[in-house]
Amino acid sequence: MPRTRIGGIGMYVPENVVKNDDLKQVMDTNDAWIQERTGIKERRFATRFEDTTATMGAEAAKIAMERAGITAADVDFIIFATLSPDYYFPGCGVLVQRILGMKEIGALDVRNQCSGFLYGISIADQFIKTGMYKNILLIGSETHSYALDFSTRGRNVSVIFGDGAGAVILQPTEKDNQGILSTHLHSDGNDAELLSMPNPGFHAGKFWDDKKPIQPDQPFGGMFITDDLLKKDDLYPNMDGPAVFKKAIVKFPEVIMEALNENGLKPSDIDMLIPHQANLRIAQYVQQLLQLKDHQVHNNIQKYGNTTAASVPIALCEAWEMGKIQEGNLVCLAAFGSGFTWGSALLRW
Ligand code: ACO
């Protein structure tokens, strides 16, 4: 059975750089608070109507395809990971199929937030290993900037996120020392609301308006989307930051060790760990716990903020472009996010 390798990688971020101090114009915040708590110095925000989640994904895909030595006509399946799609439906996969003028291939959107890219890579791995597809385009892309609460009330969340996209082409390889060794996926829905955006969704209003609980005898199964409800907080992401932090610092190392143990490897064997860029403090905590040296981990949240499903491919692409990843290197990808969902992938480059 062939293994799955990354044959090409690309990234795209909007030109518009938003520094921490720029956010002071719209909310009560400061550079010192943001850097100390998150490590973030600046992020990119799409300029309205120029970049969308799908168009940024398509730009990253063009670079990945070129580096893989293929054209859009060679791609036989699209997987698109995002929590900020251009439309509530249809998904962004079909929009990329249209933008890039691809054949009538399958297109699947993955809605697993920060671990969406990890779920995508695991799905692609199964299709490649079974021989069903030969060139899978996997994209992680987000446009957070259009749906954040930029008032002072939402500042603990809105200073963290940025826009951008990363893409890879996944292909079969017969080489012994190359490709995905294993992938590991997990979820725990008990704390689903701790990092969530309920609207649009059946429960819109329910979580945030206890005075109007959904009644089974109401029309449409009890769902009333009224102007009143649409104005409420649930149009923006809600996050219990400390709770997310506590869970992330347990699940990140756990899922990395799961991948290493399955392959009889140890943390010192990792040439490059690419953690989801949630927060620099989380990444540094994990690095310390696994006793990884600085050259074994790549972080770039300082420049791009947290780009959710795009963060792993953007960091992976940047590390590769900087020459930090060479053929044969052991690369570990890991993510944790809303759901909660988390996952890892271990591969030889
Ligand atoms: N600027 C200035 N002050 C702020 C800001 C801001 N942007 N945001 C909050 N504050 C203030 C609050 O008003 C509060 O002030 P008070 O003490 O006078 O009441 C104080 O700072 C602390 O506010 P908290 O909301 O408790 O902020 P906290 O210290 O928990 O830090 C943070 C928030 C950075 C999100 C932290 O909880 C954290 O690191 N969480 C980890 C989760 C995470 O990073 N999630 C990222 C996305 S999720 C993912 O990708 C998995």
Image (spheres, rainbow, N blue to C red):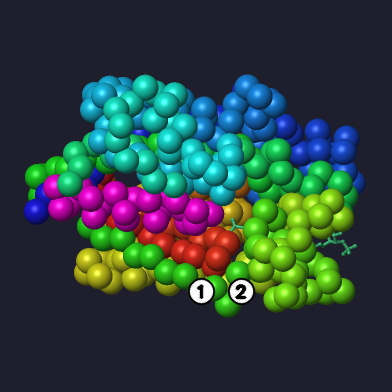
Which element type, helix, strand or loop, lies under badge 2?
helix
* Residue 67 locus on image (x, y percent): 30, 26
The magenta stretch spans residue 117: yes
Q: Which mark is residue 191?
A: 2
Q: What segment carries the magenta color?
A: 110-131
Which element type, helix, strand or loop, lies under badge 1?
loop
Q: Quadrant of ligand 1?
A: bottom right
Instruction: Please give left or right for residue 158 compared with residue 116 in the image.
Output: right
* Residue 281 locus on image (x, y percent): 62, 58
Instruction: Please give left or right for residue 131 compared with residue 170 in the image.
Output: left
Q: Residue at x 66, y 68 (%)?
A: 221
Instruction: Please give left or right for residue 21 compared with residue 319 in the image.
Output: right
Q: Which mark is residue 188?
A: 1
Q: Can residue 76 be seen in this snapshot?
A: yes
- The quarter of the rendered structure image containing the C terminus is top left
Q: Nearer the viewer, residue 318 or 77?
A: 77
Q: Residue at x 57, y 62 (%)?
A: 338
Q: Which mark is residue 302?
A: none
**Residue type, label 1:** Asp
* Residue 102 locus on image (x, y percent): 33, 26
Label 2 to label 1, Cα distance in Å?
Answer: 7 Å
* Residue 104 locus on image (x, y percent): 30, 32
